[in-house]
Image: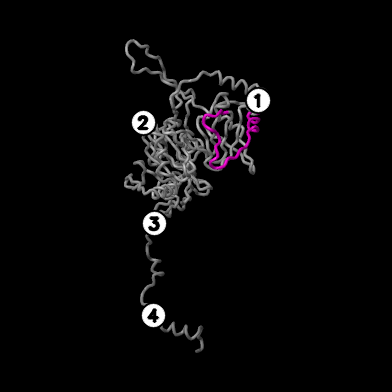
């Protein structure tokens, strides 16, 4: 190695063999070049089909009131339970969901009734109650599925309905000592239930005057003639001849109709004046910051329309419109049952994993659901009703989710979105961006606000297929 060499002989040979640079390198050339840039990208953006497909109604006063015919159907909700180890207890106040205890206010008596509920377990296929037998107790279903079995047209068994967590059956026994079971109830899975007997209720009523008077008051209410929806009957006469007496009638309304107030999603967007002044080529920094903030607000808006406990579709679907899949997975039969509960269904809404699970069930039966064209997009459908994806519908830890089916539009008494347009500094319908000033640190603040809500005009406008399994492969 010669004097001054700094590497092994092999390195010297390779250095001697490398050709000399004859032109400007790309690294140096980039210092004089202008790059082509994309707008800021955002992974959170989805298709937001619900916002696009809902008819939006202008709510000028900020509140939308839904007036309905007077309905006598009460106590058709779900029960909530508390689990401690293997022991299950019903929340005392939840007993008001039973028709016999609706509007009953004595917390001590409700607590005593909750304590008298005995825990029972049933295995798959075990009969809980036999049709025609005397009904002397109400069952509260804490966990599991129960099938209501009726008699088919040729004497065979027919599954009339499937009950799941939070449901109850046999409540007529608390008011009627002569009540009988209309259907056979059979456990479809392992079930945990609480049972409250009529004897326990009457025993407590002997000591609690408030409960005795409450039950007596319910027994004294005359039977109200209603239609199959629970609405007060409108007396009519048809097919008569001669001088028959025509019935008199009137249409009664709910005395306390529900009101929906517009909800709000807000944030304060901050941009430094130096950034807003100097760094605006080729894209305006403030505009890009605002664009991505609006996208996030719209995503949150759709999430709230699905999941908000006050006005969200999942929470406000009528319990009579909630179905359970017969085999856990979403089958074509379940989708048909969901469609049959309402007229003029306009759309299904499901998590992408639920759509995939439904597709697997169709594949097993050799069915190929058609696609419909919606604004240039090919959307899968069932019976001509499009199935839109929505990742805002939650998937539980047990890998179950829900599928929504709805009729939309104010004219069709369906599901509608609520908003108010014409706001100050409005940049999109019912979304405004208001300048709030510049603080002492030279930071500009903008208040970005979106107002929205949703209303279900009549109960059968929305149905939900609950507890759909999305991770079961057969």
> Answer yes or no: do the residues labelled 4 and 2 have beta carbons within 8 Å?
no
Give the label, 1 or 2, closer to the camera: 1
Give the label on residue 20, or none: 4
Real-space Cα distance between discs 4 and 1? Answer: 104 Å
Whether residue 126 is in magenta: the answer is yes
**Residue that mark 1 sits on:** 203
Can you give x and y, in whole percent of width and height, for residue 249 in the image?
A: 41, 16
Whether residue 453 is in magenta: the answer is no
Which type of secondary structure does the marked residue at label 3 adopt?
Answer: loop
The crowd level at tag 1 (other Cα within 10 Å; few <14, some 14-19, many 20+) is few
Give the label, 3 or 4, closer to the camera: 3
Real-space Cα distance between discs 3 and 1? Answer: 75 Å
Per the rendered image, the range of residues in magenta is 108-135
Question: Quadrant of residue 464 in the image?
Answer: top left
Let me know if residue 248 appears in the view. Answer: yes
Give the label on residue 38, or none: 3
Real-space Cα distance between discs 3 and 2? Answer: 44 Å
């Amino acid at each position: 190695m010669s004097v001054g060499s700094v590497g092994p002989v092999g390195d010297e040979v390779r250095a001697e063999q490398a050709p000399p640079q004859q032109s400007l390198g790309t690294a140096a050339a980039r210092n004089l070049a202008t790059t082509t840039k994309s707008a800021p990208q955002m992974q959170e953006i989805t298709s937001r089909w619900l916002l696009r497909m809902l008819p939006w109604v202008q709510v000028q006063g900020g509140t939308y009131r839904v007036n309905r015919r007077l309905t006598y159907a009460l106590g058709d909700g779900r029960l909530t339970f508390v689990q401690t180890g293997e022991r299950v207890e019903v929340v005392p106040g939840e007993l008001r969901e039973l028709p016999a205890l609706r509007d009953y206010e004595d917390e001590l008596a409700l607590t005593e009734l909750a304590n008298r509920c005995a825990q029972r377990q049933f295995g798959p296929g075990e009969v809980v109650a036999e049709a025609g037998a005397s009904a002397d107790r109400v069952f509260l279903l804490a966990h599991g599925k129960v099938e209501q079995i009726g008699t088919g047209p040729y004497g065979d068994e027919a599954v009339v309905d499937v009950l799941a967590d939070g449901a109850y059956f046999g409540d007529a026994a608390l008011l009627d000592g002569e009540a009988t079971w209309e259907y056979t109830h059979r456990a479809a899975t392992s079930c945990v239930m609480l049972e409250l007997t009529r004897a326990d209720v009457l025993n407590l009523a002997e000591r609690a005057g408030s409960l005795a008077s409450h039950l007596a008051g319910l027994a004294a209410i005359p039977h109200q003639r209603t239609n199959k929806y629970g609405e007060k009957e409108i007396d009519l006469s048809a097919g008569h001849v001669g001088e028959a007496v025509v019935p008199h009638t009137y249409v009664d309304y709910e005395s306390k109709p529900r009101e929906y107030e517009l909800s709000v999603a807000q944030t304060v967007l901050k941009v430094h004046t130096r950034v807003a002044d100097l760094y605006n080529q080729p894209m305006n920094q403030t505009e890009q910051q605002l664009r991505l903030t609006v996208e996030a607000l719209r995503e949150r808006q759709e999430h709230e329309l699905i999941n908000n406990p006050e006005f969200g579709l999942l929470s406000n679907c009528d319990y009579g419109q909630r179905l359970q899949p017969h085999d856990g997975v979403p089958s074509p039969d379940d989708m048909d049952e969901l469609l049959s509960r309402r007229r003029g269904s306009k759309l299904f809404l499901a998590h992408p994993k639920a759509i995939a699970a439904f597709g697997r069930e169709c594949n097993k039966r050799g069915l190929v659901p058609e696609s419909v064209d919606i604004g240039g997009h090919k959307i899968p459908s069932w019976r001509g009703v499009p199935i839109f994806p929505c990742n805002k519908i939650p998937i539980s830890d047990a890998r179950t989710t829900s599928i929504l089916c709805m009729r939309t539009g104010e004219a069709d008494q369906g599901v509608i979105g609520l908003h108010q347009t014409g706001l100050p500094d409005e940049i999109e319908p019912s979304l405004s961006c208001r300048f709030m000033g510049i603080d002492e640190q030279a930071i500009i603040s903008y208040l970005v606000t979106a107002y929205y809500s949703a209303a279900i005009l009549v109960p059968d406008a929305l149905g939900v297929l609950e507890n759909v399994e999305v991770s079961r492969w057969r």
